[in-house]
Amino acid sequence: MMMWKPITLCWRKVPPVDLVLPLFIAVTVRLFLILRWPHFAYDDALITFRYAENLAKGIGFVYNPGERVLGSTTPLYGLVLALFHKLGLDIFVSAAVFNLVCDVVWLYLFMQTLMSTINDPARRDIAMAVGVFLGTYFPFLRVTVSRMETSLFLLFVTAALWAFMHRRQVLLGVVLGGLVLTRIDGLVLLVIILGWFLWRHRFVPILLLIGIGVLLIPYGLFTTVYFGSPIPHSAVAKAVIYPSVFADQFSRVDSLITLAKHIFAGNLYHRLLLVPFALVGFTILMRTRATWFMVLLALFILYFTGLGLSNTFVHEWYLAPLFLVYGVSVGSGIGLLGNRLLSVLKTSALGRSLVIVLLATTFVLVNVYIATDKTEKDYRFDRNVLQNIGLYLREHASPNQSVLLEPIGYIGYYSGLRIYDAMGLVSPEAIVYFLNYGVKDYMVAWALDALPDFAVLRPQSFSKPHQSDTRRFSNATN
């Protein structure tokens, strides 16, 4: 019984009344966005959708039937979606609802973790402010409605911090294993936590390693046999092709500056208003000397440095760990300063509640407006351009025909054709052509050799055909 006592007590840290407002707002806002765009998703999400549907149909965990290439960096999320599809559920709706549930759980865990850490009299206000802020912050709303795996990733990150704080080694290991299977960059947090045990306690956490091995060892054996390697090919393609494709657009210094601007300022510099609160909240959290926050801070530093120095295109969902640290700092600052101000003004309980509700409502409306405006623009482009191209190909091509293109998400999902992926995520041969012909010429050279039935390429892909292929290129286009 003593083994479970810390967990049992932890569930009672946050009073139920404090959970109502943050979780109710988070669920309501997400339901609004999901119902507004029932079939919206980021382009990359539809790559995982196609893997999931092929698995559910008995074709296998593959993108192109008969080609065993692990082009998804989120196999666990793909398995979850495959289960939903097998049960006859709409994959767009089930992915969105699943993300919503994950968000509710990780928000709850984060509020519990804060309440177990902060000893300040304002800790209830801090936990509530963090819950409202993280639950309605624009970047988190976007990744939920996008049907990406980010919500599950954040759930595992938060659960890992909770298990780490309560010294549940086996549970922590299983959670870290799930984190890596959700996104391969979860290895960063795994390495940080293992490093902490080795540095701080000078011992190898055997129970933790057992927990990790429960998931990762069977997965590693299966993927080695099935795909030939446990490393997702999409990760290899991004490491090889992405940096060269985007290297001419900005330097590493520019990349770091752009990343910092995106996190702390925003495109309209509106996030600068939150920086003072972030500084106050960061000071509070540092004073607690909580090991879970130090681990999270180390994750922030490594992510920021790695993404900034990679000199490659950074997708919005890559930034979730960065926004998590920034968001908990901002929320903590808002909660503390709000508590102090209301205490000085000697606000009554009713007045205090009204102020909190008013501020929360204002913040929610602003973020919903930003999320709605941004998502509507993406939805129109994805639906009017990418989806329509996919539907056109489905209508005018036979099922056994092929197409070379980039990006492959919407077009590949709706066309159902055999895909030659110009970025190499699901096509290993793209890397070979890239290394042989270079970034300017490899798509045309590959198309001339592979002879797909269709090619959907950007205009710049035809700018400079390789000199040795000029005659073939001219004949093909004539």
Image (cartoon, grey):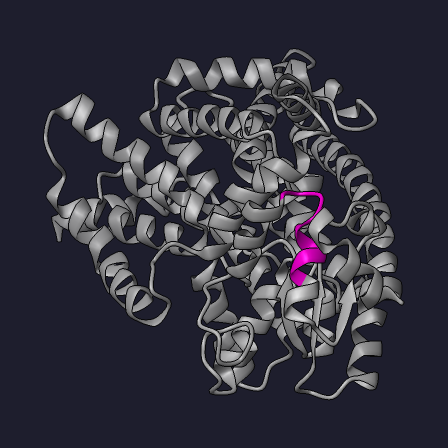
Q: Position of residue 430 (x, y in %)?
A: 57, 56
Total numbered circles:
0
- Picture layout, residue 331 above or below residue 230: above
For residue 16, side relative to residue 139 (left or right): left
Residue 280 falls within the magenta-colored stretch: no
In this rendered view, identify the residue nearer to me: 248 or 337. Answer: 248
| Quarter of the figure with residue 416 | bottom right
Q: Is residue 161 visible?
A: no
The residue range painted magenta reads 438-446
The residue located at (32%, 25%) in the rendering is 291
Q: What is the quadrant of residue 269 in the picture?
A: top right
- List x then y, in percent, for residue 305: 50, 24
Where in the figure is residue 478, as x and y percent of width and height? 89, 67
243 is higher (above) or lower (below) than 67: above
Looking at the picture, tell me which residue is in the foreground, 298 or 15.
298
Closer to the camera in the image, 15 or 109:
109
- Please, is residue 137 above or below residue 36 in the view? above
Residue at 60% from the left image edge and 42% from the top image edge: 242
Q: Measuring 21% from the left and 55% from the top, which residue is drawn there?
A: 213
Residue situated in front as seen by the camera: 451 or 332: 451
- Image position, residue 22 (x, y; %): 61, 44
Mark yes or no: residue 219 visible: yes
Q: Is residue 445 magenta?
A: yes
